[in-house]
Amino acid sequence: MIEESTPMEQHSDSSLNIVSLRQANIYQGNSLVLNNVNLEVDKGEFIYLIGKTGTGKSSLLKTLYGDLYLKEGEGNVAGFDLKQLTWKKIPLLRRNLGIVFQDFRLLTDRDVYDNLEFVLKATGWKDKVMMKEKIENVLAKVGLKNKGSKMPYEMSGGEQQRVDIARALLNNPMLILADEPTGNLDPDTTDEIMQLLFNICRDIQTAFIMATHDYGIIQRYPARVVRIEHGHVKEISAAGV
Ligand SMILES: Nc1ncnc2c1ncn2[C@@H]1O[C@H](COP(=O)(O)OP(=O)(O)OP(=O)(O)O)[C@@H](O)[C@H]1O
């Protein structure tokens, strides 16, 4: 069941920094996409990342999960120095993150349980009983208790997005990066998913950075807003969207 949450009920403690980018320049190949990015995110903070298409929202998220190497400036995510991020360290960084995409990216030939078990095994879990307990725990958190045997094609878009969120929660991430997580959903389902994300943020104190084009969401679920414009990242208030 989805509980009501108060979106602005967020706590910020500067001693619990999860993301820190200082004077970071973000490149795609040789092109400079974002210039002099400064961004600090604390434990349990919810942040919207907005900006016109092609401005660099995904590039910023990719830098944070180690898909784009940070060449210039300073960056730290969940205790990992992005400048020191070798190929070997990327899986370790990602174990501390959850990543949620617009298009769910579930394995279509496996049921929900196997989709989640696949991630646990890939991240080093071995004990079957502990894996079962963890999978049941995250499914309950996203309101999909007893849905482990469903195939992705038997589920609605909203349910598939819940599975994607459950998958992101498996390794107790400090930070969830969500790239347009409601982009494929109708307005009612979007509200259910937003309520779920805010509940997770509040209850588990997971930080979120969510890229979105949907400014209506920000009005309904206000939180800190960061806008990308002309290659720069600016802090704005929800009211200024
Ligand atoms: N793999 C890539 N190789 C080269 N350039 C890329 C690549 N991916 C993105 N870009 C370029 O980087 C810039 C920023 O793209 P990015 O996808 O980060 O923007 P975005 O704000 O997330 O866009 P959207 O809202 O459409 O998803 C664009 O000019 C884009 O063309």
Image: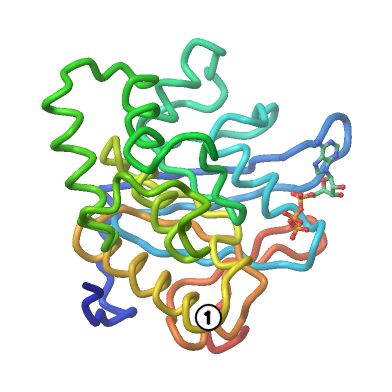
* Location of residue 164 with respect to 125 vertically, above or below: below
Residue at position x 40%, y 51% in the image: 163
Quadrant for the N terminus in the image: bottom left
Residue found at the very far right of the displayed protein: 31
Q: How is the image coloured?
A: rainbow
Residue 13, image x, y percentages? 25, 58
Find residue 74 and report its image quarter: top right
Give the total of numbered labels: 1
SS type, badge 1: helix
Which residue sits at x=25%, y=19%? Answer: 125
Of residues 120 and 77, the one nearer the viewer is 120
Indicate the position of residue 23 as horizontal and vertical percent values.
63, 43
Q: Who's the residue at 26% across and 40% down the image?
A: 172
Query: In this rendering, would 56 be left or right of 220?
Result: right
- Within 10 Å of disc 1 (Cα), the crowding (few <14, some 14-19, many 20+) is some
Residue 111 vertical placement versus 118 (above, below): below
Q: Residue 150 location in percent, x, y?
A: 37, 49
**Quadrant where the C terminus is found in the figure:** bottom right
Tell me where residue 75 appears, x and y as whole percent.
Answer: 53, 35
Q: Which residue is mark 1?
A: 217
Asked whether, in this view, residue 48 is left or right of residue 171, the answer is right
Horizontal side of residue 113 vs 46, given as left or right: left
Looking at the image, residue 215 lies above or below residue 55: below
Name the foreground residue: 39 vs 55. Answer: 55
Amino acid type at image mark 1: Ile
Q: Is 61 situated left or right of 138 in this image?
A: right
